Structures are given as structure tokens and as C-alpha cells.
Image (cartoon, rainbow, N blue to C red):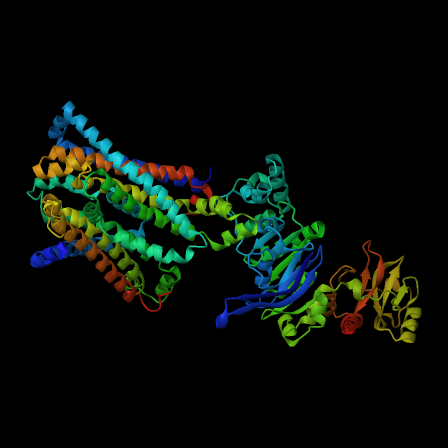
Amino acid sequence: MSLWVFLQDNLSMALFLTWEHLWMVGLSLLIAIVTGVPLGILITKNRKLAQKVIGGANVIMTIPSIALFGLMLPLLAVFGHGLGKVPAIIALVLYSELPIIRNTYIAIKNVDPALVDAGRGMGMTKWQLLREVEIPLAIPVIIAGLRTAAVMIIGIAAIAAYVGAGGLGVFIQQGIARSHEAMVLAGALGVSLLAIVVDLGMGFLERRLTPRGVKA
Amino acid sequence: MNMKEGTFIDQTVAKGVRFLLVALLIITGIAAERIGLVEYLSDPWEREYVLFLVRQHLYLVAVSMALALVTGLAAGIIVSRKRFRKFAGIVMYVIGLGQTIPSLAVLALTMSFLGIGSKPAIVALFIYSTLPIARNTLAGILSVSPSIIDAAKGVGMSPTRILLEVEIPNALNVILTGIRIALVINIGTAALGYLIGAGGLGDLIFTGINLMRTELLLAGALPVILLALVGDYLLELLGVIIVPKGIRMAA
Amino acid sequence: MIEYDSVTKIFGAGKTAVTATDSVTFTIEAGETAVFLGPSGCGKTTLLRMTNRLESVTRGSIRVQGRDIMEMNVQQLRLGMGYVIQQIGLFPNKTIAGNIAVVPRMLKWDKRKIDERIDELLRIVKLDPEIYRNRYPVELSGGQQQRVGVARALAADPDILLMDEPFGAIDPINRHQIQDEFLKLQAQLKKTIAFVSHDIHEAIKMADKIAIFKDGKLVQFDTPEIILMRPASKFVSDFVGADRALKVLGLLRVRDAMNREPRNVIQGEFTAEEALRFMEDNNFRHLIVLRENRVLGFVTRRQLKYEQGRVEELVEKFPEELTAREPLRDALSAMLMHDLMSFPVLDDSGGFSGTISYRYIQKSILELYSESQDD
């Protein structure tokens, strides 16, 4: 009940934090897509490079997020951005790269070689082949990677409240600091709900964007 | 040995080298802040405190992982049994939903119900680590080819024997991946345990952030990163030892 | 011996119920290979899988070596029969030796005996134990894997083998080879075999008896010859193919059809003139010329006309030699190719033992036909 009261009293704050949270996650995803998808396509041409890039992204994934914030803080402090949205967004982009690069790579690699052959046989250029055949077939898998990334970084963005990035994590942070149980609950449930809704939404998108002929 | 096995070991070694490189990189990172950190760690009392926090961190991880291993493996195996298999879809869905919930939220929610201290933290870590283990155990066993199970039944194996000799060995790779994911998440999430009064290396990280004291920050962050990387690497090595060669070669 | 007695299998219940096998009754005698044949969905695989209780029997009973399978411990039942499937189903986590050792280990054989048995079996299926013993299934080709599959099934020397399209996933060249080897093996081992196939050629080749199924019903159970010559229904005749008479020729041997006392034969020392008169008197178109029971060749009337001297100096050689063991199909092919109405048939030591001709081939097929009609 106290949760309900708290939300009524702080509705504009809750909405603002949700918006802030989504905005950080969205921007990070956008950056990760712009960098990750081309990289994922690029490394399909070179197996060794692919292993290195994906292996590297894997190592980043192994680093706990709060520790990554801790590492970046002194480095970015040199430029005056130790706290705030900059370290948060850098971290969110880094964590999004692995699922995006890996899924792009796998998706393009898994396009039936016979199709690529057929396309080439019809006289398509490499670029046309990519645009007409490989990318359309790979899109659902890339979206799936995006979905994994989005859900993951919504959680990490919550932790970023501790380096002053804002977002729904602020409720959790402030709530714990002030022993304000309703505030903690509001933050925890809010973040969870956000993650679940985004997951469902992107799952829907994933199915919608799968070409009819590709659906099993 | 043959080629495939050779490259597999090569890859593992290469990963080890890469891991050393990362460690080296981190050490360069230290260099930037060396003076502060070295000074901090050279104080015997502070060093003792860091080691105490490492032990506390490991305690949180070890207890919750042990519980998660037992529960996750058992749950995965039980749901994969013929009698419960019809629930596999629902169980997978629920696990997926659980994994969607952010780790900080799980900790915060656990705190709301169980209060502060190491016990609620262990409960949260346990729940969060059980999910990938149970999921991969179930998925791994379900992915064993039906024709292999058919053959196993056909030669007269009992269900228990099929589980131990066929299903688990063939699913081991996937199960181990689940355990690796769980361990890495667990070590990272344990660093948040400080927020609900469980101590651990998060103590130094969050104090460092609040006071803007880089040496504290690094004294907490670096061990956490090392723990995660080493834990992950050790489990990968374990895979080379315990996953049957015939499976690794097929992968 | 496997006895199927009114075996019925119904999947599902109510409106969605599907009858997979419908009151199937027949017996596979000990040492016999019975091929279950039919289009997909005819119930042949279900019947096989009921035999080792991978599927339950809805109604009726199956007896193995005289015992009702439902009264036996299911693991014991399966340990007593080898099982080979199309997907091969080798355990990827075990070595080749480990795969073969599965059943002996369950039967608690001692280690040395198991090791000896593994090597023995690998040699039987023509894989060098030194090379293959410690390999893993992924390292073997499909054909090699299925050899191991057969070895695994034979490991504890069961009396019964259940084989579900065992050679179906193997490429044609290897398939023929492995079929031939398996036939030789079976000639020694004399297992009782239930063998599922959808390939009429494989069935004719492997079977002592063929059981043909349609929509869960057994439509005919007989020897391949009778199935081919006297199909019980239009379904069977369609299934075995329009060329079924030709398929029979592949099953019959020259010795089944040959003329053992041919009259168009002459000894080489007779003169051309005598031979020509002999032909004209009997209205023969050609004569087979012999000396000391060896075939020298043949002569025709045109060759003999206006010739003096002995026939053996005038013979034309036969372009091919046929033995009594050859399939009739090969004999017929030789006649067609060389435009000859009859050929001499040689025994194993090369001596003349009779002739084979179009007429005799036709007669034997007709005999087979009327014989089966009498049944």
C-alpha cells in the first residue's frame, strides 16, 4: 500500500526517471548498433579476426559492471567525466556489443551458402548480395541480439545510478540510503517491469520482422 | 593426438594468453593510479581489510554457488524426466522471465522481504545463479538427440543409467556453460551485496565512488574483475578435463 | 523365434486415435530374417518398436523365444536383443570400444573378456581394432558408424536382432557392400532378425520372408519369390513393381531352371555331315559341341553346310560361361546381349551339366506361379 502512496506522491519523478533510464538505454543501443552491426558483418570475412573480436567482447562481458564503472571512473575523471551519464553510456555500449556483434556474425554466417551462390550466379555484386539476401535473412537474429542486449543493459543502467547517471536506479539507491522501503520497491519493481516490457516488445518485433517465408 | 583436439587445446591456451594480456592491461591501468593504490595497500591494516573483504566476497559466492549448483542441477534434471517433461516449456519461460529481472532489483527485492545482512544477499545470489544452471541443465538434456536415447533404451539401459551414462555426459558442455554464466554473474552481483549490508569487495568500490578515492575504488574493482576472469577461466579448463572428448570434437 | 499374435497398437484416444498396427499375426522362425516392408506410416516401425517394448502393445501379444514380452523385465528383454537403427545412435561421449562395451558391461562381463570381444567384433565388421578402438563416433564416416552400430548390437551375442532401416542413411555404394557383408555374417550367425525397410530391392536381397504392411494391416507374409510371383493384392503388386517378374529372375538361380538332359549336344569327333543330319532330323538350330564333358563351343546349320571333317574343328566359342549358381537375371542378360537362344551351364569344376534357354526360364517362372497358386 505504501508503494502505491509513494508512487502517487512521486509520479512525475517516477516518470522522469523511467524516461531517463530508457533514454540512456536507447542511446547506448543505438551507438552499439551503429558500431556493432558493421563490425559483425566485417568479421564474417575473416575467421581469425572474428575469433579475436568476439573473444574480446566476451572478456568485457565477464567483467562485473560495477567493477567496470570503478575502472572507468579514474580514467574518465581525467577528462572531468568521472561521474554521470558518460561512464554509464560507455559501459552500456560496451556490454551491448557482444550480443550484437555475435548475433550479426552468426546470422550472416548462417545464411545458406546455396542462396549466396544463387545470388552471385544471378550477377549480384557483393554489396547487393548483402543488402538483398544476407541482411534481410539475418535481421531476426540481429534483433534477438538486440533484445538480449537491451534487457541486460536495463539492469546495468540501474547500477549506474551509483555513479550518478540517474534513471530508476536512483529510487533503489536513495531508498536504501534512507531506508525508505517503498522507494526501494518502486525502483526494483520499476526496473524489473521495464526489462520485462522491453523483452516482450522486442520479442514481438523479432517475430514481426521475420520474413514470412523464413518462419519455421 | 589428432588435429581437432590439438586446435581445441590451442584455443584454450590462446584464451589463457588473452586473459594474461587483459591482466597486463589492467596492470597498466593501475600504473596510472599506482602511487595511491600502492600506498593504500602498503598499509598493513588496510591490506588486511582488503583481504578480509576478498574472503567475505568469496564466502558469499561459494555458499550461494554451492546451493545454486545443487538446486539448479537437480531442478534441471527433474524437469527433464519423462514425467515432468510437459512442464519444460513453462519452466523455461519462467526462468527466462526471472533472468530478465535485473540483479540489483533482485537484491533490492530480497532486502525488502528479508532485511539486510549476508543472509539475504546469499539468498538473492542463490536464486539468481540457480536460473542459468537449471536452464542449461534442462536445455542440455533436452537437446540430446532422441535417436541416441532410443538406442540407449534399445540396448537395455535403465533410466538411471541413461541419465548418468548418456544424457548428462552429452549435455555436460551446455551445463558447464550455464555454470560459468552463473559464476560470473554471481561474482559481479556479490559486489552489489555491500548495498544490502553483506560486505564483500563492493564495500571498497562504493566507498571509493562516494569519497572519490580512486585507490579504494581500484582495490575493490580489480580483485572483483580478477575473480570473475579467473573463475571463468578455471571452469573452462574444467570443461577440457571433464567434458568427454567425443563431445568436444563434435562441437 | 518371435510370434506376433493379433498385435494392435492405437496411438492417442477418442477422435484423434490412430491405429498403427491392426491385429497383426505372424511368426518369425528362429534363424530367419523377416523384412517388414511397406510405405511410411504403415506400422512396420511401430511393430518393431513394440518387439523390444519401446512402444507398448495396446492389444494382442508378442512372444519372444516362447515367452510373453509383457511378463519379462523390460531391461532384460532388451539386453537379449540387438537393436540397430537408421540414425545409428552411437553414444557420442563414448569411444567406439565404449559403445560396443555397453551391453557386456551391463551383463557384468569381466574386463578382459569385454576387450577381447570388442576386438573380435571390430574385425567381424571389417574395422581394424588398432585404428578404431579408441576413436570417437564423430571421427567415423556414416558407413563406418553403422558397422559399429551392428557390432554393438551383436556384442553380447543375442539370438535376436531388431533392425530399423539400418542401412537407410548410408550412401548407395557403401550400402550394397554393407548389405553383402551382413548377409555373409548372417549365414554364419543364423540370428532371428526383424528388419524394417521401405526398399523392395533391399527386402528381396535380405529377406527369408517378407511381411508387407498397409495401413497397419499385414497384407502378405511370404518368401520373396512368392511375394513377387503371386502378390496377394493389387497393393502388393503395385508395391513390388511392374517389373516383379524381372525381380524374380534376380532371386532364382540357373540351377533352378536349367535343362539337365539337353538333346542338342554332340561329341566333337562326329563329322559335319553327321551333325547336320542330326540337326535336320531333330529340327535343332544349333548344337553344343563337347569333348570329354568340356564345352568346346557351338555349331549352326549354316556353318556345317558343304563342310567336311569333324565338328570340333568348326565350332564357334561361347562368348560367356555360365555356372549353375548364377542368378537367372544374369543368364537372361547374356542371352539378350549375344543373341543366343541357349547357353551351356557349367558345374563348379567347369564340366558341362546342362543348358539354359529362354524356354526353360519361362517354364520355371510359370511353374513357380502355378505352385504358389496351389497353396
| Image-based side of C38 in relation to A69, left or right | right
At x 15%, y 35%, the residue is B204
Farthest residue to the top: give it: B44
The quadrant in which residue C280 appears is bottom right
Residue closer to the observer: C250 or B97: B97
At x 17%, y 55%, the residue is A190
Q: How many marks?
A: 0
Using the image, determine if residue C229 lies above or below residue B78: below
Residue closer to the observer: C231 or B142: B142
User: Where in the figure is residue C171, as x and y percent of width and height?
Assistant: 55, 57
User: Where in the figure is residue B26, as x and y percent of width and height?
Assistant: 20, 35
Residue A23 visible in the current orientation? no
User: Where in the figure is residue C170, as x and y percent of width and height?
Assistant: 55, 56
| Image-based side of B159 in relation to B242, left or right | right
Farthest residue to the front: give it: A1
The quadrant in which residue B18 appears is top left
Residue B72 visible in the current orientation? yes
Using the image, determine if residue B72 lies above or below residue A193: above
Farthest residue to the left: give it: A80
Residue closer to the observer: B154 or B244: B154
User: Where in the figure is residue C136, as x and y percent of width and height?
Assistant: 50, 44
The quadrant in which residue B38 appears is top left
At x 56%, y 52%, the residue is B154
Using the image, determine if residue C80 lies above or below residue A133: above
